[in-house]
Amino acid sequence: MEPATTTTPPTGAGAPPTKRGVWAQLRPLLLRLHFYAGVLVAPFVLVATVSGLLYVWTPQLEQALYADLLRVPAAEESLPLAEQVRIARAELPDASVHSVRPATTPEDSTWVLMDLARNGTGARTTVFVDPHAGEVLGVSESYGTSGALPVRTWIDLLHRELHLGGVGRLYSELAASWLGVVALGGLALWVARVRSGRTRPGRAGSGRSRSVSAHALTGTWILVGLLFLSATGLTWSQYAGANVSDLRERMAWTTPAVSTQTVSESPGVDVGPDAVLASARSAGLDGRVTVDLPADHTSPYVVTQLERSWPTRADSVAVAQDTGEVVDVVRFEDHPLMAKLSRWGVDGHMGLLFGVPNQLVLTALCGALLWVIVLGYRMWWRRGSRPGGVRGPGRPYPRGSFPALSWPLRAAVAVVCAALGAAMPVLGVSLAAFLVIDALVALVRGRLGAGGGRVR
C-alpha cells in the first residue's frame, strides 16, 4: 500500500508509454494492484494467520486437554501389545482394529485405532489403553495420519475451511495465493521507493510516512517466511494443490511407500504385533511408530515412524505376518529430493519440524504479519484526508495503468497473469474478476461523466 506521489503521473498521462522506462510504466499498475489486494484480500489473510497461529500450539493444547487419555503412571512392566489390542477389542466389539500406536515412554498410553461401520466422517475411533494396568482410559475420535484429536481437528478445519466445507476451502486458497504476490509486489515498490531517494530506511518521519516505513520494512524482513507459508499452504489447497500433486506425479516426486503385496507363504499364520514391532525396531525404526494391521490373512504388517520433530525419522517397513521378517524397507534418506522438501515444508508449516523452536518462529512470523496488516489498513485510512483534518478510507490509485503500458509490456503482463492463473486458479479467477469489475466501473463512471453526472 505504497502512497502515491505527485511527481509521477498516476496513469498513462504524460510521456507516451513507449518513451518511458519499464518501471515507470509498471509502477502505477503495481500500486493499484497492491492497494486493492491489500484492502480486499487482507481479511482472508488475517483469518488464516490467527487460526494458523492457534493450530501451531495444538500439540501442547492436546496434552493439556487430553492428559487423562494420553498419560499414565510410569511402571517397569507392560502388557504384551497383543493383549492391549485384545482389551481394546473388548471395549468396542463391533469395530475392527486398523492400527496400533504403542506407548513410547513409560508414561505414555497405547493407542488402538479402530474402524466403526457407523463412522462416516473419515475419523477413526481410538481406544486408549494403559499399557501397565491393562485398563481402558477412554475412547475418542482421531483424524488423519497424525491422529489429531477433536480439538486439534476443530482448529485445523477452522484454518482450512472455516467449517464451511468445500466452499470454505476457497478462503484459505485465496489467502495463500495472494500472500506471495502481494509480498513480492510490496518489496518491488519499496525497493524502487528507496532507490529513488524518496524514502531512506531508518530515518524517522511523521504520521503516515512512519506507517509506510514500518509496513514495508517489516514485510521485507519476513518476506522469505511469507513466501514459505504461501507455497506450503497451497499444497493443501483444492485447485492449486491438485496442480502440485499432478506435477509431482509427472516428475516422479511422490513419496515412496513400502509394498503391501501378498508375501505370506502360510495364510492364516500371524506372529502378532509384538513380534512385528520387535522386527521393526531391529530394522532401525525407533521412537514413535504406528503398526498397521494386515488387510487380510496374507498381506504384511506395515510399521511407520511418526516422529515429526526430526525430519529424517520417517522410515517404514513391511513385515510378513507369518514369519515376522522384514520384507520391504523404505528409508527417508532414499526419498526423492522433492518428496523430502515437501515433507519438510509441510512439517515446518504445521510447526512440527523442530518442535518448540519451529513453533516460536511461526509465532513471531504470524505476529509480524498481523502487524503488517494493521499498518496497511492504518495507511489506507490515513490516506483518505478530508477537509478539516478528518480521516477516512483512502481512494484507490487511479485506473488506466494497464492501457498505458507499451504493447510488449502488456503482452508480458498478460502472459505472466495467465501462467499464474493456470498454476493457481483461485488467484487467476479473482484477478480476472477484479479486472472485469474495475473495467465495468470505469465504463459506468465514464458514461455518467459524459452525461454530466458526478465522476470520481
Image (tube, rainbow, N blue to C red):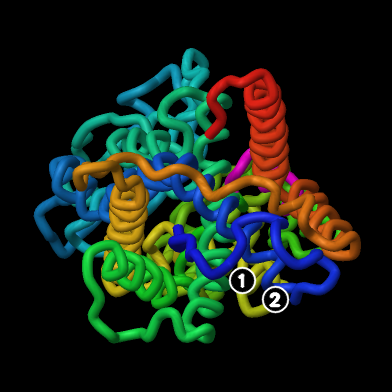
Q: Residues within 10 Å of mark 1 (few under 14, many from 20)?
A: some
- On screen, 378 above or below 164? below
Out of 36 and 50, give the one closest to the viewer: 36
Give the residue displayed 39% in from the left and 63% down from the top: 352
In magenta stretch: residue 198:
no
Q: CA distance from mark 1 to mark 2?
A: 6 Å
Q: Is residue 35 left or right of residue 374?
A: right
Place residue 439 in its image quadrant: top right
Task: Give, as a single range, the part of the protein colored magenta.
Answer: 236-245
Q: Cβ–Cβ below 8 Å for labels 1 and 2?
A: yes
Q: Position of residue 217 (x, y in %)?
A: 37, 75
The answer to whether residue 201 is seen in the rendering is: yes
Q: Is residue 82 visible?
A: no
Residue 414 x %, y % = 83, 53
Q: Residue at x 44, y 17 (%)?
A: 94
How busy is the neighbourhood of tag 2: few (under 14 within 10 Å), some, or many (20 plus)?
few
What amino acid type is highlighted by mark number 1? Answer: Leu
* Vertical relation: 354 (above or below) 389: below
- Which residue was labeled with disc 1? 341
Task: Report if residue 240 lies within the magenta region.
Answer: yes
Above/below status of 117 relative to 356: above
Q: Residue furthest front?
A: 452
* Residue found at the far top of this picture: 118
Q: Looking at the rendered structure, which numbered label has been put on residue 337?
A: 2
